[in-house]
Amino acid sequence: MKETDSNPTAFDWTNYFESVLTVARSSKEKRLEWESRLRAALCRGGLSACDVNDPNWPVLSGKSNDYDIIFRSLCLEAACLTIEIFNETIRRLVRLLKPGGLLLLVMVQNESFYYVDKEKFFCLPLNEAKVENALHATGELMDIHIDSSDTTVEDQERNTMSNFDGEMIIHAYKTKNIE
């Protein structure tokens, strides 16, 4: 899926959705549904940047129930300075989702640092339990799934850029309003 049908150079999300939904054991129909929702959101100008450490950042302080999909990949563990900020960020992201909206996160496990060139950066070490606690604490998510895989000892020994020991794909849906 391209960001928009009219832009031939746009990023193609198809492989990403196929791999995530395969791990999540979702059907091709589900992938097509989420591709359609993502395309519609992007056409409405739906990509937003945010600073999770700034409590007044406009996106995170925005209108509730405004987003169909919130996707974060390999950034919350690097951006959140403390577990409290991580928990609050998850709560604020979920608040922004429409009822039935998808929260989709890709994260690494137990990473405390990473390098960009020769510069070392802090990373908040997160594991499945910490992420699951933050998701459940919102009280607004259903069908929470965390699929994780550990890196091999050989991979860890070869990795000189960071110290993560596994990966997680997390997806959950915001509860639908019952009226």
Image: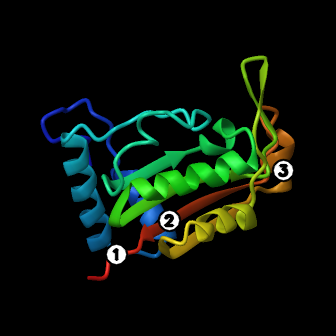
Please report the residue visible at 19 percent of the width from the left and 41 percent of the height from the top: 44
> Residue 75 in the image: x percent, y percent?
59, 40
Mark 2 element type: strand
Q: Nearer the viewer, residue 109 or 60?
A: 60
- Point out the frontmost of discs 2 and 1: 1
Q: How is the image coloured?
A: rainbow
Residue that lies at the very extreme toward the left in this rendered image: 6
Please report the residue visible at 41 percent of the width from the left and 38 percent of the height from the top: 59
Q: Earlier in the sequence, mark 3 or mark 2?
A: 3
Q: Which residue is mark 2?
A: 171
Give the amino acid type for the residue marked by disc 3 in the picture. Glu
Please report the residue visible at 50 percent of the width from the left and 47 percent of the height from the top: 72
Give the amino acid type for the residue marked by disc 1 in the picture. Lys
Q: Earlier in the sequence, mark 2 or mark 1?
A: 2
Viewed as shown, does residue 81 lie left or right of 33? right
- Point out the frontmost of discs 3 and 1: 1
Please report the residue visible at 39 percent of the width from the left and 61 percent of the height from the top: 18
Q: Nearer the viewer, residue 160 or 42?
A: 42
> Residue 12 in the image: x percent, y percent?
32, 42
